[in-house]
Image: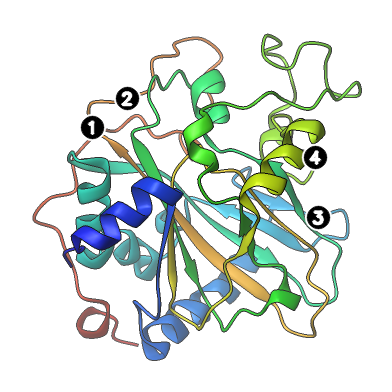
């Protein structure tokens, strides 16, 4: 799938691009059937659970599901990613985020790139993430909320969190879980947030099943509680330039968070509709 110049310009200016219903309901429903199978994987370190035992995130789902393996190889995802990154890409990180109905689970305002820069040693934000909506998603379900154009500010000042550490940029011993749960270690300073939102506003990324949101690693985003009676599940695929590999050699994060296998995704494009046979 080739992007138009208008779509490329929109992404470069605002830091995100929404393509409605890029996948069909039939394709997504086949993926959703696989999600139920992950309940048996709760003991894995790559599966993050809430205090009540509900699954919050599943990292590297492609290692446990052939269907999710096929998803990140889709031409309709990889080709636009290559156009926006302007290079060949490889799979850097892949996860499923789950929000149960009537839950207070949320994600604080943050950027993704600080985790990859400080924790993994990735030098440049020449990468992007794609969120795939696994059901119709309304504002009541706690969708992704973004500050358009905030990616141009690069890495923003972090909010001080005394219970995590004194210097959030330098302390490398913070618990790994604070990269993954709701109490994130690299969140945006509240005063800076107020200024940015006053200037740029916010955009909720709700949409129909199969809709895809492409977003820059420095784009400031968050999500609120799911106050609806419906679950909100998403797949988030992060592609990185093959020339932008992680450089950190000590205390490296697990492969399910930071892949160092820089094999470019070429000549492996699949078609979900034809290849998903149940």
Q: Residue furthest right?
A: 163
Give me the residue at 24% from left, 67% from top: 76
How far is mark 4 from mark 1, CA to CA?
31 Å
Q: Relative to 12, is 178 on the left or the right?
A: right
How far is mark 1 from mark 2, CA to CA?
6 Å
Task: Determine which of the numbered discs, if any, sits on residue 50 in the image.
Answer: 3
Of the two numbered discs 1 and 3 in the rendering, the one whose residue sits closer to the viewer: 1
Q: Disc 1, disc 2: CB below 8 Å?
A: yes
Q: Disc 4, disc 1: CB below 8 Å?
A: no
Bin the neighbour count of mark 4 within 10 Å (Cα to Cα): few under 14, some 14-19, many 20 and up: some
Decide: is 5 above or below 186. below
Which comes sooner in the sequence, label 1 or label 3?
Answer: 3
Q: Can residue 132 be seen at all in this image of the molecule?
A: yes
Task: Determine which of the numbered discs, if any, sits on residue 245 in the image.
Answer: 2
Residue named by callout 1: 242
Element type at marker 3? Answer: loop
Image quadrant occupied by the C terminus: bottom left
């Amino acid at each position: 799938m080739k992007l138009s110049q208008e779509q490329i310009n929109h992404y470069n200016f605002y830091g995100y691009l929404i393509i409605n219903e890029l996948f069909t309901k039939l394709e997504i429903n086949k993926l959703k059937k696989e999600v139920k199978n992950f309940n048996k994987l709760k003991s894995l370190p790559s599966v993050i659970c809430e205090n009540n035992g509900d699954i919050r995130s599943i990292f590297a789902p492609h290692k446990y599901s052939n269907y999710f393996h096929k998803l990140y190889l889709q031409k309709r995802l990889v080709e636009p990613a290559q156009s926006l990154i302007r290079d060949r890409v490889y799979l850097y990180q892949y996860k499923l985020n789950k929000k149960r109905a009537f839950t207070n689970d949320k994600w604080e305002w943050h950027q993704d790139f600080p985790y990859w820069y400080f924790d993994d040693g990735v030098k440049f934000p020449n990468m992007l993430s794609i969120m795939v909506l696994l059901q119709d998603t309304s504002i009541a379900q706690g969708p992704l909320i973004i500050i358009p154009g905030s990616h141009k500010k690069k890495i923003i000042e972090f909010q001080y969190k005394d219970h995590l550490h004194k210097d959030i940029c330098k302390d490398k011993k913070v618990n790994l879980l604070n990269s993954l749960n709701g109490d994130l270690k690299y969140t945006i300073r509240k005063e800076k947030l107020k200024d940015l939102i006053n200037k740029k506003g916010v955009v909720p990324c709700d949409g129909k099943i199969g809709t895809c949101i492409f977003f820059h690693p420095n784009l400031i985003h968050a999500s609120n509680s799911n106050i609806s009676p419906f679950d909100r599940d998403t797949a988030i695929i992060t592609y990185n330039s093959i020339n932008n590999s992680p450089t950190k050699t000590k205390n490296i994060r697990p492969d399910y968070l930071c892949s160092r296998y820089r094999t470019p995704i070429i000549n492996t494009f699949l078609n979900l509709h034809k290849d998903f046979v149940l």
